[in-house]
Amino acid sequence: MFEISEEQARNFLKDLGNLENNRRPLESVWQTIMEMIDPANAFITKKYTAKRVWNERIYATTAQRALPKFVAALQSTVTPPNQRWHRFAAPLNNLKDKQNITGWLERLTDSIFEMRYRPNAGFNKAIIKTWRGYGKLGLGVMFVDEDKDGDGATYESVNIKDFYPVLYNNGTIKTCFRKMVKSAWEVCEDLRGRGIDPEKVIPSEVWDRVKANKFTPLNLVHIVCKLSREEVEAAKIKTIAADGTEKITKFRYKSYLILNDMSRPAVLDHNFFFTCPYMFTRYQELDYDIYSNSPSLEALPDIKMLQRVRKSTIESAEKAVDPPLLARNDAAFGGLMPVAGAIMAGTLDAEGREMLKPLLTGDNTRLGAEMEELIAKGIEDFYLVPLYLMYYQDGKMTATEINQRAMERAMLMSINVFPIENELLDPMVARELDIMKRQGRLPENMPEELKALMDADQPFAAIQYEGEQHKAQELIKANGIATTIQAATALSNFDRHIPLAFKSYKCLTTLASANGMPADHLQDEDEYEKLSEAQDALEQQAAQAAIDSSAADVAGNMAARYDNRLASGSY
């Protein structure tokens, strides 16, 4: 439906060239950062060579050692792999109290985490590379695609040097270009998997090279564009289910795979996406640029200063250990080797005075070490190392102290975490739900209310994050409930009706949410009321039975006594 001509493909590549020219000054800054922080991957503006995987000008590795701690702080705060860091809730308020909907959404949460963390999905590797990208350049690109075997989603972190986005004001992608280099066999395999004969779409001059060597690298450009409203309506598909309900399917993105290995481009494939497969995310959005600030960019002056100080400290230590020697101008010490155990002839005059003395420079290494420590602490602050070490500063902490530390860390991290959720996690989860829906991987027995929303192409699940910054908000409520109940217990000594002022079930649900308890592990409020009424009725029946039993016992005792008196004649 949206095929393009060679001229249109050429225009796309022209747009890519303009984006490359506009970004080239920024890439020189990125190259400097990478050479100082991650020399093994410092190939933004330079080509990879094995001998350049390290930088001999680096004397201090404070930033390199701080970067993994920054990655660990983000990983443990935003996407901890050993726990659920989000759940699904009903998208409409009038559906949130229905237990069948809550239970199904809990199963959906379990299903999406199972798909995301399965062995061949690659999510952990991709998300860690994304966090490293935040630490180095403040940028991350995630590509979420369907598994070739239809087994859920696959995740890939894209190097920012190969990715060029065009964004709307709200940060969503309008158009993006991704440069790729793939072996010819892989390109041919992908095309055949989509039902395309490679020989028919690859130009003959390139195909001759492919036939001669299947490992020939091919330069490709993957382009994804958001459809306009008119294009969405034109590509909309309506189907009628067996029960007569209408199902709407909308394509929102179009894509092109262009071979850029010769003077004229060749379109190898065009496709549609229901949701954007790329997520372009920024650590700290800039005011006048689509790109981002980063811890490494902010710390770069300190990193350079630390290299100078460390180099000077090393030179000072070398002078102290192996000092320069002072000699008279007319002294002849050619070939003198002042090594241990050597006999150095000619170094004393006729009166036994030294003609060769070491240069005493003083103990300057201590000052250099103090400066290093001060600068290193500043660099670690940029990489959030104090937040990472927050739980390890004291040998022992009470539960209250741990909660307080967690709230403090969450508040400091929130200014960076919330933008990450908006630009990375929200579109990623939407993409995952889209893939699960089309692969038939949604849990069975979907409630009719949610199915109606899905068939109408409306959101059928709302995401709720459960990271530290969100738990901190819940913990504030939970602590407020606990403190108020404690105060109310003291007041109940004066007024026994005080406990009746609490909505106990609401308090319980808030406490359960703050402690991370799954919502479907509690009865809904209506069922709770029914169970409470049934329990009250049973307790009343038991109390009445006890009263009746006690009365019967009293009556029986009185009758027995009367019978005894009659038998004994004592009446």
Image (spheres, rainbow, N blue to C red):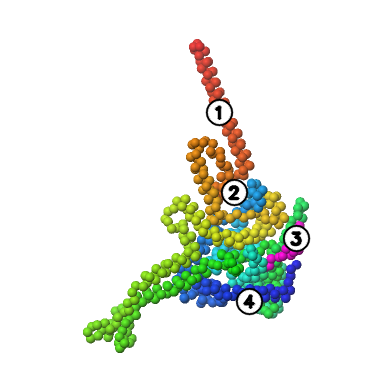
Residue annotated with mark 3: 237
Depth check: give the residue in front, 541 or 216: 541
Q: Secondary structure at mark 4?
A: loop
Give the residue type that dot 3 points to: Ile
Residue annotated with mark 2: 519
Mark 3 Cα shell of 10 Å, populated few (<14), some (14-19), many (≥20): few
Which residue is outermost to the left? 351
Q: Secondary structure at mark 2?
A: helix
Q: CA distance from mark 4 to mark 3?
A: 40 Å
Specify which label sits upstream in the sequence, 3 or 2: 3
Depth check: give the residue in front, 137 or 194: 137
Q: Which residues are magenta?
A: 224-239
Q: Secondary structure at mark 3?
A: strand
346 displayed left or right of 7: left
The mark closer to the camera, 2 or 1, is 2
Q: Are marks 2 and 4 in contact (CB under 8 Å)?
A: no
Specify which label sits upstream in the sequence, 1 or 4: 4
Determine which of the numbered discs, if any, sits on residue 546 in the image: 1
Give the residue type that dot 1 points to: Ala
Quadrant the N terminus occupies = bottom right
Mark 2 Cα shell of 10 Å, populated few (<14), some (14-19), many (≥20): some
Residue at 34% in and 72% down: 363
Residue at 77% in and 52% down: 244
Q: Secondary structure at mark 1?
A: helix
Give how far across and how far down residue 194 sits, in percent.
70, 67
